[in-house]
Amino acid sequence: MPMTSNPYRSGLLRARRVLTLAPGLSGDAVWWQDGVVRGVGCAAALGRTLPRDVPRFDLPDALVTPGFVDGHTHFLMWALGRRRVQLAGAGTRRDALRLVAQAEPVQGWVIGQGWDANDWEEPPERGALDAVQPGPVYLDSLDVHAAWLNSAALAACGIGRETADPFGGRIVRDAAGEPTGLLLERAVELALPHLPEPPDDYATAAVLAAQTEAHRLGVTGIHDVEAEQALRVFQDLESSDRLRLRVLFQPPVADLPRLVRSGIQSGAGSEWLVCGGVKLFLDGSLGSQTAWMLEPYRGRRDRGMPISTLEDVTAAVRLATESGIAATVHAIGDAAVRRALDVLESLPRVAVPHRIEHFQCVHPDDLGRAARAGIVSSMQPAHLLTDIPLVERHWGERGRGAYCFRTLLEAGTPLVFGSDVPVATIDPRAGIFAALERRDDTAGCAGWRPGERLTFEAALAAYTVGPAAAGGAAHRRGRLAPGYDADLVAWQVDPAVERGSGDAFRAGGALLTVVAGEPVHGPAAA
């Protein structure tokens, strides 16, 4: 059914305040028609001018904002993971093993995700998994930069004593040289082709359920970083008029030759699905201590690892930009961030900006470079909540260059905030809380490096205005103003949010979510 025939693509919403992010435009009501905002202003005045059959939503205590866009997701992975073994929160190896033991194999495998061994007294190793599951077991780490396999899975993947470490990866081995079952960084790629791919119809059902959850949390769009099956699912949902998230899809660099042959360029697509930049990895993660650093980790000689050569990265981004395709570069350690800046600064502009994903630990000399080059800094505030002790433990004083939200913003850096789901929750309340408070529930009230706190409007803009610009849609999304798409959220939150209380926003929730003028979560219109 064409969306133009849907009567719910028009409406009038009365609230406490409409926070438009459009200079000089405010009010307590927003009116949209055929999926596009037509007016913002006084509810009484707008109500008198509209036909009586326009659907009306009366939420007088709500704060209305543009729809939140998660700037970094692995949406299909998250959707499927909601149906797999969930290990996040397993405080010990024994806790994780108990969950694995209870799991029923699917397509012959037990697949799970979310383990974090940083505080475990016993390491992840294959023998422990062998004792609880005889068939193959594959478990992604919380940061998705390591995998834990049992003996049956190693055998199924052909990983043994003689298997060489790939460049940018490591097969962890015992004293006798045998694989322990732990794969780091690009060594994980040795296993991935052997995992059973869920059927597309199963994946589609999982994504539909995840889309409903995203709407419940106030998310109206995503910047997704995944491979071909995710793209097929989004295309199928779009063709059947079931896709209700704005998706900027960022394929892996392995897809670059196909994109070039097909003539697909960044910015091309539809109302719902647009091609972003190709994703390249320069290093690993803080949690796995594989983020590539200029100096060794505290108490170690190891600096992490680059997982792509300079020659490969340079050749890939040159081919991409010559073909009208942007570069999306993963860089967490300060050495990786510096290399990303070196590579991206001189690239010609294309339809969407080049961007660095995570931009997590930045040398002070490099903090202003992204702004000068117009490179997007795509960051995940919610990671800060779990990374504070890891930054202090592994980077020490160099961690002053980590999560420098205010410094980057004041330098003019284009900021995009997201979650990296399933690494962190897709719930944007966690990200807003982290950006405003910079503390977990056990930290002091001052927060961690409190000078880097953002105001609520600045953090909101990084979830709305920033993603719209990064997706080439700044002229029609990210704000609530006449002519802009009616993607919006009405929040039940204490007004203290607008004075900078992250606690208040985290305690609230989305009452109504509207995408393209269509209510996808919340109460029916009057």
Image (spheres, grey):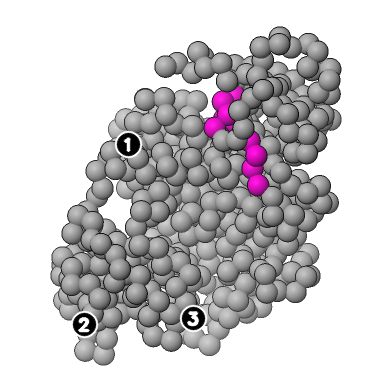
- Magenta stretch containing residue 117, yes or no? no
Q: Which residues are magenta?
A: 509-520
Q: Residue at x 39, y 35 (%)?
A: 234
Local crowd at mark 3 within 10 Å, few (<14), some, or many (≥20)? few
| Rendered image: mark on residue 119 | 3
Q: Residue at x 24, y 43 (%)?
A: 199
Side of 264 where 488 appears, left or right: right
- x, y percentage for residue 104? 25, 62
> Separation of disc 2 and disc 1 at Cα?
38 Å
Name the front one of labels 1 and 3: 3
Q: Residue at x 34, y 74 (%)?
A: 98
Callout 3 secondary element:
loop
Q: Which amino acid is tagged 3?
A: Asp
Local crowd at mark 2 within 10 Å, few (<14), some, or many (≥20)? some
Callout 1 secondary element:
helix
| Rendered image: mark on residue 178 | 2
- Magenta stretch containing residue 512, yes or no? yes
> Separation of disc 1 and disc 3 at Cα?
38 Å
Q: Nearer the viewer, residue 140 or 275?
A: 140
458 w.r.t. 447: above or below: above
Q: Residue at x 29, y 61 (%)?
A: 111
Q: Nearer the viewer, residue 118 or 186?
A: 118
